[in-house]
């Protein structure tokens, strides 16, 4: 197994009263996801390395989006300097290196933040109190300028059988696009509970470029609006998106003996996912 690079092997055994035993070994395969808590295979992937449709969906163009009026780099800089007077900031070369690595330019507010503190652990000399001070000043566990990353769809893992049942939709009044990931979501910190904070450069129809969003570790699609700008976030001026419930047909429909009874009944123009299950007597 070591030579083959296999860490474990799933198996099932059928043992007859006579003692006759049939052992079935299930070797790992790129075409089959492993089971969860049992030896039986998960989803069969007919094309290797293929992705569920929601994970292939890119955000809509946002040419008309603009920063919020509350975005104030000068106010943000003064506030951070007051809160972190002894912090070591990133150089322009370090910021440029981060932009080159990410393949996207950092918005001005994010540059201001890292010019005040580059958030490297070695700069704090293993001083937890200093690290806590940065947490309080920025209101999150700030990633270093070297650890910024793009929250593309590939960063949000989900098993095929669940991912294929997700619906991706952005409402006309949404501030955040309802996609799995985006080349414009720059993750710069965590909230201490496993959720990521990101600057959003591809907002929804009612959003702003540079708004702050939260990517929940318990969800695989979409994000929650936290603030219209990084300035608002640091100054604790949060903005929560109001989600209005509408009486609309479901985006994901389950046709089976316990739910919708027919495909015809489930069909409508906005349907994203159709799951066909078991009927009584089938």
Image (spheres, grey):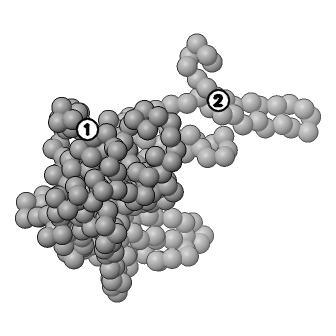
Instruction: Work out which residue is located at the far top of the displayed protein and give it.
Output: 3
Q: As rendered, which of 141 and 222 lies closer to the eye? A: 141
Q: Going 62% across and 32% down the picture, which residue do you hit?
A: 26
Quadrant location of the C terminus in the rendered image:
bottom right
In the rendering, which numbered label is found on residue 9? 2
Residue 187 seen by the camera: no
Mark 2 and 1 residues: CB-CB less than 8 Å, in contact?
no
- Picture quadrant of residue 135: bottom left
- Picture quadrant of residue 242: bottom left
Q: Is residue 225 above or below residue 74?
A: below
- Picture quadrant of residue 278: bottom right
Q: x and y percent of residue 141 in the render?
A: 43, 51
Name the N-terminal-most of marks 2 and 1. 2
Q: x and y percent of residue 223 in the render?
A: 35, 62
Q: Going 22% across and 55% down the picture, which residue do you hit?
A: 77
Q: x and y percent of residue 173 in the render?
A: 21, 77
Quadrant location of the N terminus in the rendered image:
top right
- Circle 1 — which element? loop
Q: As rendered, which of 176 and 11 lies closer to the eye? A: 176
Instruction: Work out which residue is located at the far left of the displayed protein and give it.
Output: 64
The local crowd at label 1, few if under 14, some if 14 to 19, many if 20 or more residues have their Cα within 10 Å, is many
- Measure the C-alpha gap from mark 2 to mark 1: 47 Å
2 vs 1, front mark:
1
Q: x and y percent of residue 11 in the render?
A: 69, 34
Residue 111 seen by the camera: yes
Q: Going 46% across and 77% down the picture, which residue do you hit?
A: 260
Q: As rendered, which of 225 and 94 lies closer to the eye? A: 94
Q: As rendered, which of 93 and 6 lies closer to the eye? A: 93
In the rendering, which numbered label is found on residue 90? 1
- Circle 2 — which element? loop
User: Is residue 117 found left or right of 107 in the rendered image?
Assistant: right
């Amino acid at each position: 197994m070591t030579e083959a690079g296999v860490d474990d092997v799933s198996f099932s055994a059928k043992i007859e009263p006579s003692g006759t035993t049939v052992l079935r070994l299930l070797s790992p395969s790129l075409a089959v996801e492993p089971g969860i808590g049992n030896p039986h295979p998960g989803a069969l992937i007919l094309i290797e390395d293929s992705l569920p449709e929601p994970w292939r969906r890119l955000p809509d163009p946002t040419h008309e989006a603009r920063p919020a009026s509350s975005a104030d780099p000068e106010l943000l800089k003064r506030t951070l300097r007051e809160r972190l007077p002894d912090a070591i900031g990133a150089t322009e070369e370090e910021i440029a290196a981060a932009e080159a690595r990410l393949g996207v330019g950092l918005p001005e507010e994010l540059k201001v933040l890292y010019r005040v503190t580059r958030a490297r652990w070695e700069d704090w000399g293993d001083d937890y109190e200093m690290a806590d001070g940065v947490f309080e000043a920025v209101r999150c566990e700030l990633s270093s300028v070297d650890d910024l990353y793009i929250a593309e769809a590939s960063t949000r893992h989900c098993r095929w059988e669940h991912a294929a049942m997700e619906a991706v939709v952005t409402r006309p009044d949404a501030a955040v696009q309802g996609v799995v990931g985006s080349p414009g979501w720059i993750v710069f910190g965590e909230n201490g509970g496993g959720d990521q904070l990101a600057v959003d450069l591809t907002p929804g129809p009612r959003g702003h470029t540079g708004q702050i969003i939260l990517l929940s570790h318990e969800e695989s699609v979409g994000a929650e609006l936290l603030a219209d700008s990084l300035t608002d976030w640091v100054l604790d001026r949060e903005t929560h998106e109001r989600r209005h419930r509408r009486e609309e047909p479901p985006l994901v429909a389950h046709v089976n003996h316990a739910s919708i009874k027919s495909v015809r009944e489930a069909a409508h123009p906005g349907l994203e996912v159709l799951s066909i299950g078991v009927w009584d007597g089938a």
